[in-house]
Image (cartoon, helix red, strand yellow):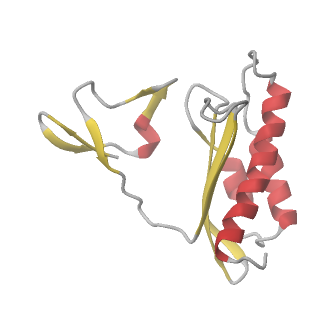
Amino acid sequence: MVLLGPDGHRKEPSADWFTGFLSTTAASNEMVVEIRFTRPRAYGALTEYARRRGDFAIAAVAMAFDVLEGRCRDVSIAVGGVASTTLRATEAESLAEGAPATEQTWRKVARAAAGGINPPADLNGDAHYRRRLVETLTERAFAQALASVLPQC
């Protein structure tokens, strides 16, 4: 993230950006003016589930990856709505890295993403419900990402 404030521009690594629910490292007198990606990937998608359009997501999954020679490379998976900050699904990323870009792989990856979180229960659902949402949303994100570039998949 690149922020601009009274002291000029400053950079904030995305891993440090979120500090809690609706909280970031931005000061009250700063604004985001640019988001830089270290290396854009060919495939990416964001899926979310909310009860009504425009509501905060009960669960969300964003992913980006490349496919080289039929295998997933440089995989990033982020999960939101299941903790006070956005989480990286590092176990799921490791499972996907180098694996074939197939539905079977992504079913396993989706289960790993869901199994790697410990969401709180609230009025929108319990932990089991949110894990199932993350599993479903991860599979959907993969399908959407591939469909956006390779319609035949």
Residue placed most toward the observer, 147 or 5: 147
* Residue ID at (69%, 84%): 69
Res 73 quadrant in image: bottom right
Horizontal side, residue 73 vs residue 1: left or right? right
Residue placed most toward the observer, 38 or 123: 123
Horizontal side, residue 78 vs residue 131: left or right? left
Res 140 quadrant in image: bottom right
In the image, residue 63 lies at what x, y percent? Answer: 62, 55
In the image, residue 67 lies at what x, y percent? Answer: 65, 75
Number of numbered callouts drawn: 0
Q: Is residue 75 visible?
A: no
* Residue ID at (74%, 16%): 122
Answer above or below: position of 85 versus 12.
Answer: above
Taking the view exactly as shown, the residue that stands out farthest to the bottom is 69
Horizontal side, residue 87 vs residue 72: left or right? left
Answer above or below: position of 46 versus 123.
Answer: below
Q: Is residue 99 visible?
A: yes
In the image, residue 139 lies at what x, y percent? Answer: 79, 55
Answer above or below: position of 14 versus 6.
Answer: below
Location of the C terminus (image quadrant)? bottom right
In the image, residue 96 lies at what x, y percent? Answer: 72, 61
Taking the view exactly as shown, the residue that stands out farthest to the right is 104
Taking the view exactly as shown, the residue that stands out farthest to the left is 7
* Residue ID at (46%, 42%): 15
Taking the view exactly as shown, the residue that stands out farthest to the top is 123
* Residue ID at (80%, 35%): 131
